[in-house]
Image (spheres, rainbow, N blue to C red):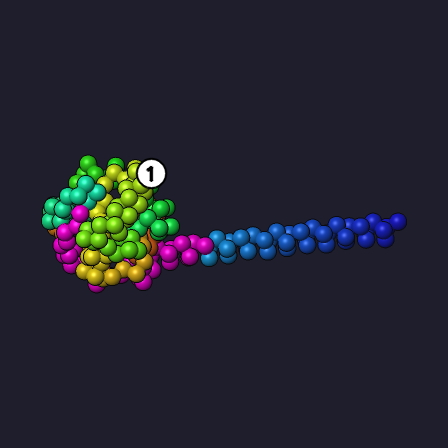
Amino acid sequence: MLGVTLLLLAVFAWAGWANWQYRKQAAEKAAAAATAKAKLEAGATGDAMYTSSPLLGKPAPDFELIDMKGNKVTLADYKGKALLINFWATWCGPCKLETPWLVELQNEYGPKGFTILGVNSEDDNVGPDDKDGWAKDKAAVEKFAAKEKMNYPVLMNGDSISKAYGDPDVEPASFFVDRSGKVIATQMGITSKDDMAAKIEKALGSGM
């Protein structure tokens, strides 16, 4: 009888040790996964390949584009304001994710002297001289802007100025400009709303 009792105690002890080992390994795996995820997220928004640009620290190139109402708009029209020049397209998936953030950021920082300029770059790369192509692009942009309730200027034919902005090969492509007209931060691809807010605050606080 004593032998059976000792055997049962040994079995229970082994089961307890095995369960503890399993829980320990599971916890270690979870911690490793969380660390890897954190590193991935940090790299997605902080890696130099996404944030570097030859324009950093230099004046934002001036331009003349046309807004949704057919008015000519230049960068000089916004002298003294902090800006986010955001290259985007209606077919761009990350742009669709980002647009609601931009609407909220415009609402939050607009009264402080900040404006987003949504520079549209459709695939067609057409100007107003191509009436059919221009009308097609404009209709697509107007539909998107209405659906997303875009509350900032939307400018057409962004491809015509992309070279001046380094020919960004991804969209969205964002250029944060301070009140003096200098590019103080850039972002190629999507980032987080909080990251964009931090760059906007930097733009508002510098160049005075």
Residue 118 can be seen, yes or no: no
| Residue 93 drawn above or below residue 53 | above
- Residue farthest along the front direction in this orientation: 132
Residue that numbered label 1 is attached to: 147
Image-quadrant location for residue 28: bottom right
The image shows residue 192 at horizontal and vertical percentages of 34, 48
The image shows residue 13 at horizontal and vertical percentages of 73, 52
Magenta stretch holds residue 26: no
How busy is the neighbourhood of tag 1: few (under 14 within 10 Å), some, or many (20 plus)?
few
Does 68 sit left or right of 191 as displayed? left
Image-quadrant location for residue 41: bottom left
Which residue is painted at 30% across and 38% down in the image? Answer: 146
Q: In terms of depth relative to the viewer, which is nearer, 52 or 164? A: 164
Q: In terms of depth relative to the viewer, which is nearer, 100 or 43? A: 100
Which residue is painted at 37% across and 46% down in the image? Answer: 97
Q: What element carries label 1?
A: helix
Check disc 1 and give the amino acid type.
Answer: Lys
Identify the magenta region.
37-66
The image shows residue 206 at horizontal and vertical percentages of 16, 49
